[in-house]
Every structure is written in structure tokens, then in C-alpha cells.
Image (cartoon, grey):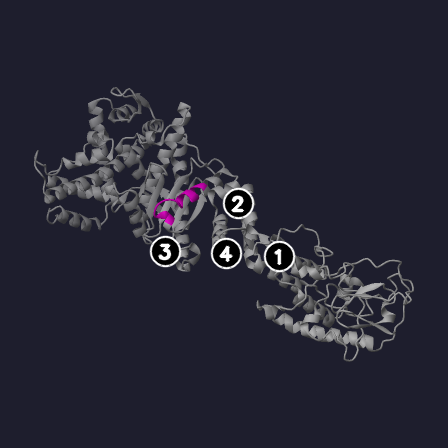
């Protein structure tokens, strides 16, 4: 007997090659072949060899596909999960002990014939080593037809497997191998080496052509619907450095089970959902204020993540997620600073305000300010999609306003901070409560729309360049003015910035003096002349190169006074007296007092539209004249000199300082404590003008001083504006 045949497929095996075994598994069909006991087995162990599977057991293919679970971080298992073989198959099969069949002419066991027989083997085809490391006596065999048959089988099988692998994306039964056997056995590669399916080092030492043949057969014969097989095969390829094959297997798993954690982890994917949850826990401030990287990460998840379940990322998306994580963690460290937190907190709030939330905005923190610029674009458009020219324009507006407000705040403290004992807030002392907010709309239309929707009950906002809203959120609102410079653009913003600053310092100084925090509403206690006159006085500036010089003569107000001094006598409207100027508390008082100069409405009658229009004209004209005269009064108190020394400045500063601390008085009707508004009496006491004669002398001197100031700064262009106003008022052509 020179050979022994497999009872399953008829493959022939030389007795010389199998003499050391009691039994072995056929490398073609997987059947157990019993070696007759009469055959001499030199150096063979007393009992059967232990079974060492290098691939999934034959019965593994029919195993139902379990739901994939997260795999522990250990290496791929040495063998797949065991399963009891079919009763018709002996349980002692072992892939590692299979010798190669002899290649005989006309034999039924030729490995290149038919897909059904080719893949039924459940393990590797490795045989006895020839290098002596097996511990058995080396046996010499002739490199005859047996070895030639093996090489031929491998080459033919490798080629067949290659083309089957090319069809692996086809999900049909034919493409995936309907008759593919349950076991996987890519075959023994060389009789001169160890088993590459058992030893990764042997695999890596094989020539590329042999590795390719083995790799393709494994890929072709694996059951792609069996997650456990795929998991095992991924680990198998990973141990052998077969990265591309491993990636392919992992891809098959994820096609069926997109949330298979072990496959994502083996592939090196990042569980972005878990990372985001961890970031929210470890970076609570950045998450609270919704910094730009946090918002970008949310958008990224909305665009690329699943509606439910974990979000696994790889490639460019993973790189972006990891970069955003770095930025968020850096933001968390930065936001630990009170000023940075204040800026971010108000930036988050600004994105919730009606109209503002519809347009992207850029902002900058410049202590004690945070300044926002609304980018001009379509509502709801992302800032990333905006035309570069528009974003550059918004950045230009932001840079200009940062410079303006920095100069304003510095100038205010240089001129008045020491006199009024005001704290110059820096990055270290500015908090969420004390930070000053400015919102600049880049387009006037958006500014008007915001006013119409947010403050429809304030009629005087029509045509107003800027305003300070003293209730929360206490923003200065303005718009760019389409590039107009000088007083026409920036003086209105600075006028409102004075209101904002005075309001903030009144709360700060009063709360400190009383030892308790007072409401913001109580800080609006000043009389109208002081509120408007002081704001107009300080905000008048001139530019010396790029440097702002504050508290300058207001040429617009001087022009207005020059025109009104000529128009009022012709209109027979009473000019504002100093006593009347000092008596008004609020804007409503101004409208009432101004309307007294116009036509009266008979009691019980319904006024005509024409009559109402005339009264409105009177109110507007007299209001503008009032503001101009309050500016001139404060300018006089600051600059009028006697013997070369400011005559009223120190006394005015004492009065102004007292205004920064709110006094509370008891309301006689309600018994409640209310903030007290200073009146004429307080100013007269501060200036030493208690007597009527002294008060009249002061008023006359102020008016004469103002006339001299007008003559000093009179411009040729004023006459054209006077002519227009005279026509509006029906006064004809002025002389």
C-alpha cells in the first residue's frame, strides 16, 4: 500500500507522508482519514494529536449570526468560538494536522475541481515541518509528483479565489458561493515551511504571490453573514499585517451591523457620540456658552451623524472632530477667566435675540466691552457660506468700532474717572454683570427691522442712528451707516455709550455705598438736562489723525442754536428758559412742554390730521433746540473761565459725582422707598446760586458766552440749512 484514499472525496495521500498519524482530516473535504495500524509510525506520539484549529470549525458556517457585541481590547482569538460538529463528523478533526493529498491522474480529489469540494475544509493545510522544530525525526521525501501537485493546486486555487474575491460585493447566493462549505481552509502553501495559518511569522515570510492566494481564499470562503466568523477573520488578518484584507472584513461587518463597536474599534474609528458626551462633562463652561467649536461640532453631527445610536467617525470627519475637541478643551481653559466667560456668555445670549439670531455675527471682546457686528446676508445663512466681501466688510466694521469704543472708554476715564472715583475696568475686573454690550447691524434695514419687531411701542426710534436700551440686556444698538464717518456716524454711538456707562457706574457706586445691589431701573433717576446734556457734551469729538479728542465744541448743536435764535422770534415760540430746562425729568415732559408752543387743541374737539402734524413739528423742533441748549449748558459749566481759571468746573463735578449715588426717599402716597431725581434746587445749591439774582446772572452769562462761541465757530454752510428749515416752518427766505 503506497497511498491511502479519503473515504469522503477519494483524494489520495502517500503513506510515507501520513505514517506518523493515527488519523487526520482531509485537506480537501474535511473528512477524517484513518491510517491503518499496520503502518509504521516512527516517532509518533502514543495517542492522537491534539486538535489545533487555525480557522473556524466546519460546522461554524451554519451557526446563526449573533448580534455583534463590543469586543474586549485583546488580540484576535487564536480560534473562533467552538461549536459541536455534526453527528456524522468525528469530533477529532484537526486542521493543523492535515497532510496534503497526492495528485493522481483522474482522481476525484483534485483540489481545483468544483467549488463545492474546494472549500469544505475547516482549517489550514499545514503539514509536518522540515526544519526539525516539530521535535520529530526529519523524514526525507522525494520532490516528485506529490510536491508538484501541491504547488499546482495552490496556484490554481489562488487564481480561482482571486476571481471569486472580485465578485465578493455581489450579495446574491451565486456570487457569495451558495455551495461554499461551512469550514474555511485556504490550503497549505509550502511543504518546506511551517503553517502560515498557525504562525503569523511564517505567513509574513511567504512570497507575495502565495500570501495573495491565501488571503483571497480566506476572503472568498468566509461567511459574510456570520459576525463571529468575520470577527475572527479580522483578528487573523490583523495578526499577519494584512491591513487591506482586515479593512475589507471590517467593512463587511459594518455593512450589516453599523453599530458593531468591536469592528469600529478594530478599524480605528472614533466613537464621536461618546467623545461628545465626555466633552460636555469635562468642558461644562464651553458647553454652556456654546462656543464656536461646540456649535460646529453640533452641526457636524447633524450633517453626518445618525438620527439615533452611536456616531462613529473616521478619516477627515474624525480629524475635524478631534481638532474641534482640542479647540473646545482650549476654550474651557480660556473661559475660566471671568472676562472671557462674560464675552462668551453674552455671545450665546445674543444668538437668541429676535432678528439677531437670524443673521450670523462676529464679535470681539475689548474690556470692558463686547462688540457684535451682524453680518449682512440672507436670514438663516451660515457664516461659512457668506460671500467673502461681506465678511470682510463686517470685520472692517468690527475693527473700527473696537477702536472707537476703546478710545471712548480711555478718554472718559482720563477726563472724569479720577474726579468721579470710577473704577477703570480691565480684563481682570470685568464680569458678566459689568460688561458693556454693543450690537452693530451692518445694514440699516436689519437695524430698522429689529426695532420694529422688538420695540414697536417706541415711536421715536424712527430715524435714530443709535440708542441705549436701559432694560436688560442693556445693549447699545446702532448700524454702520454705510461707511459715513465723523460725527454723523460715531457721535450718536458715543452719545449712547455715555448713557450706558453712566447707568453702569451709577449701579456700581450706589450698590457699594448702600451695601446692597440695587435694581437697574433705579439708576435712571437723573433729570433730563443732565442725562442728555452730559452725554452730548462728552461724546462730541474731533479726530487728530487716528486719535479721538473728546469734549469738543459740537458744531451741529452750535449751528442749530444759531438757526433757532433767528427762527423762534419769527414763530413767536417761547425759547427755553434755564428754569424750564432744569425742571424737566423725562422725555415725556419734553414733549408736553414743547407742544405748548404750537397750536392748541380745543377741549372736547377731535383734532384734524393737519393740526396734529403741526403740533408734531413743533415738538420735534423744540426737542432739538432743547438738546442743543443742554449741551451748551454743560459745555459752559466745564469750560467757562474767570481770570483764566475754570469758574464752574469743580462745583459742577461735585454735583455730577452726587448724581452717581442714588438717594432714596419715601413716597408719601404709597410709603414705598423710591429713587430721588435731583432738580433745579440741587444744581443751584451746588453752584452757589440760591438767590434769584445770582441765578438770573448765571443764565445771562451762559447765553452770552454761548453767542460768542457760535460766532467763533460759525461756518458758511450754515446759511443753506437755515434756508431749508425756514421753508419747512413757513418763514420764507431769511435775510
Region rendered in magenta = 345-357
Q: Which residue is drawn at 67% across and 72% down?
A: 115
Q: How far apart are marks 2 and 1 (CA)?
A: 46 Å
Which residue, given by chain and number where applicable, does mark 2 sit on? Answer: 331
Left or right position of 13 against 226: right
Q: Residue at x 73, y 63 (%)?
A: 122
Q: How far apart are marks 3 and 2 (CA)?
A: 28 Å
Which residue, given by chain and number where applicable, does mark 1 sit on? Answer: 65
Please report whichever mark, 4 or 2, sits nearer to the chain's N-terminal start.
4
Q: Distance between the residues labelled 1 and 3?
A: 54 Å
Would you call the spot at circle 1 few (<14 residues within 10 Å), some (14-19), or many (20 or more)?
some
Residue at disc 1, secondary structure: loop
Residue 38 position by quadrant: bottom right
In this view, the residue in front, 378 or 554, is 378
Residue at disc 4, secondary structure: helix
Q: How many marks?
A: 4
Between disc 1 and disc 3, the foreground one is: 1
Q: Which residue is drawn at 76% across and 76% down?
A: 152
Amino acid at each position: 500500500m503506497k497511498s491511502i484514499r479519503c473515504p469522503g472525496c477519494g483524494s489520495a495521500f502517500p503513506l510515507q507522508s501520513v505514517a506518523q498519524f493515527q488519523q487526520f482530516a482531509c485537506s480537501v473535504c474535511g473528512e477524517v482519514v484513518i491510517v491503518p495500524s499496520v503502518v509504521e509510525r516512527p516517532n509518533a506520539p502514543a495517542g492522537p494529536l491534539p486538535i489545533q484549529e487555525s480557522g473556524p470549525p466546519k460546522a461554524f458556517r451554519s451557526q446563526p449570526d449573533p448580534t455583534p457585541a463590543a469586543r474586549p481590547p485583546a488580540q484576535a482569538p487564536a480560534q473562533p468560538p467552538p461549536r459541536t460538529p455534526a453527528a456524522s463528523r468525528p469530533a477529532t478533526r484537526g486542521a493543523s494536522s492535515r497532510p496534503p493529498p497526492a495528485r493522481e491522474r483522474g482522481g476525484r480529489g483534485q483540489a481545483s475541481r468544483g467549488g463545492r469540494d474546494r472549500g469544505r475544509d475547516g482549517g489550514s493545510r499545514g503539514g509536518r515541518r522540515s526544519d526539525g522544530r516539530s521535535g520529530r525525526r526529519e523524514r526525507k521525501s522525494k520532490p516528485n509528483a506529490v510536491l508538484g501537485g501541491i504547488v499546482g493546486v495552490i496556484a490554481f486555487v489562488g487564481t480561482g479565489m482571486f476571481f471569486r474575491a472580485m465578485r465578493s460585493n455581489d450579495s446574491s447566493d451565486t456570487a457569495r458561493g451558495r455551495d461554499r462549505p461551512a469550514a474555511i481552509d485556504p490550503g497549505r502553501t509550502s511543504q518546506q515551511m511551517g503553517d502560515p495559518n498557525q504562525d503569523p511569522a511564517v505567513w509574513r515570510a511567504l512570497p507575495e504571490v502565495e500570501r495573495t492566494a491565501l488571503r483571497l481564499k480566506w476572503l472568498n470562503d468566509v461567511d459574510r453573514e456570520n459576525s463571529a466568523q468575520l470577527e475572527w477573520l479580522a483578528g487573523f488578518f490583523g495578526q499577519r499585517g494584512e491591513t487591506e484584507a482586515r479593512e475589507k472584513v471590517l467593512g463587511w461587518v459594518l455593512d450589516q451591523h453599523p453599530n458593531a463597536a468591536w469592528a469600529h474599534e478594530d478599524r480605528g474609528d472614533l466613537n464621536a457620540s461618546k467623545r461628545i458626551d465626555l466633552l460636555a462633562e469635562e468642558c461644562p463652561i464651553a458647553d454652556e456658552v456654546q462656543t464656536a467649536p461646540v456649535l460646529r461640532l453640533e452641526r457636524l453631527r447633524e450633517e453626518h451623524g445618525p438620527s439615533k445610536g452611536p456616531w462613529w467617525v473616521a478619516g477627515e470627519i474624525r480629524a475635524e472632530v478631534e481638532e474641534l475637541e482640542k479647540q473646545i478643551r482650549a476654550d474651557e481653559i480660556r473661559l475660566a477667566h471671568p472676562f472671557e466667560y462674560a464675552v462668551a456668555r453674552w455671545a450665546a445670549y445674543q444668538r437668541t435675540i429676535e432678528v439677531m439670531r437670524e443673521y450670523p455675527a462676529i464679535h470681539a471682546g475689548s474690556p470692558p466691552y463686547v462688540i457684535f457686528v451682524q453680518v449682512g446676508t440672507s436670514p438663516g445663512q451660515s457664516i461659512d457660506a457668506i460671500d467673502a466681501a461681506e465678511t470682510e466688510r463686517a470685520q472692517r466694521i468690527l475693527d473700527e468700532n473696537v477702536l472707537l469704543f476703546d478710545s471712548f472708554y480711555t478718554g472718559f476715564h482720563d477726563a472724569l474717572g479720577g474726579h468721579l472715583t470710577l473704577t477703570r475696568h480691565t480684563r481682570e475686573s470685568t464680569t458678566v454683570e459689568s460688561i458693556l454690550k454693543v450690537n452693530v447691524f451692518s445694514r440699516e434695514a436689519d437695524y430698522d427691522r429689529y426695532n420694529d419687531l422688538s420695540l414697536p411701542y417706541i415711536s421715536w426710534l424712527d430715524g435714530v442712528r443709535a440708542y441705549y436700551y436701559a432694560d436688560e440686556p442693556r445693549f447699545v444698538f446702532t448700524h454702520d451707516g454705510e461707511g459715513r464717518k465723523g460725527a454723523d456716524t460715531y457721535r450718536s454711538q458715543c452719545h449712547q455709550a455715555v448713557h450706558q456707562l453712566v447707568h453702569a457706574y451709577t449701579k456700581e457706586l450706589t450698590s457699594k455705598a448702600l451695601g446692597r445691589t440695587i435694581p437697574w431701573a433705579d439708576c435712571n433717576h437723573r433729570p433730563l438736562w443732565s442725562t442728555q446734556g452730559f452725554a452730548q457734551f462728552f461724546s462730541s469729538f474731533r479726530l487728530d489723525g487716528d486719535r479721538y479728542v473728546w469734549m469738543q465744541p459740537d458744531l451741529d448743536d452750535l449751528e442749530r442754536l444759531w438757526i433757532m435764535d433767528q427762527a423762534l422770534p419769527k414763530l413767536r415760540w417761547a425759547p427755553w428758559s434755564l428754569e424750564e430746562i432744569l425742571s424737566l425729568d423725562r422725555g415725556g415732559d419734553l414733549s408736553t412742554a414743547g407742544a405748548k408752543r404750537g397750536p392748541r387743541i380745543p377741549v372736547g374737539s377731535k383734532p384734524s390730521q393737519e393740526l396734529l402734524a403741526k403740533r408734531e413739528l413743533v415738538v420735534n423742533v423744540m426737542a432739538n433746540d432743547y438738546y442743543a441748549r443742554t449741551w451748551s449748558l454743560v459745555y459752559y459749566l466745564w469750560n467757562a473761565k474767570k481770570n483764566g481759571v475754570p469758574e464752574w468746573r469743580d462745583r459742577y463735578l461735585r454735583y455730577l459725582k452726587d448724581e452717581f449715588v442714588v438717594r432714596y426717599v419715601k413716597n408719601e402716597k404709597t410709603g414705598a422707598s423710591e429713587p430721588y431725581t435731583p432738580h433745579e434746587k440741587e444744581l443751584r445749591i451746588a453752584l452757589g446760586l440760591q438767590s434769584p439774582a445770582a441765578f438770573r446772572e448765571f443764565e445771562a452769562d451762559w447765553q452770552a458766552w454761548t453767542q460768542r462761541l457760535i460766532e467763533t465757530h460759525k461756518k458758511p454752510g450754515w446759511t443753506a440749512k437755515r434756508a431749508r428749515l425756514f421753508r419747512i416752518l413757513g418763514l420764507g427766505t431769511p435775510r
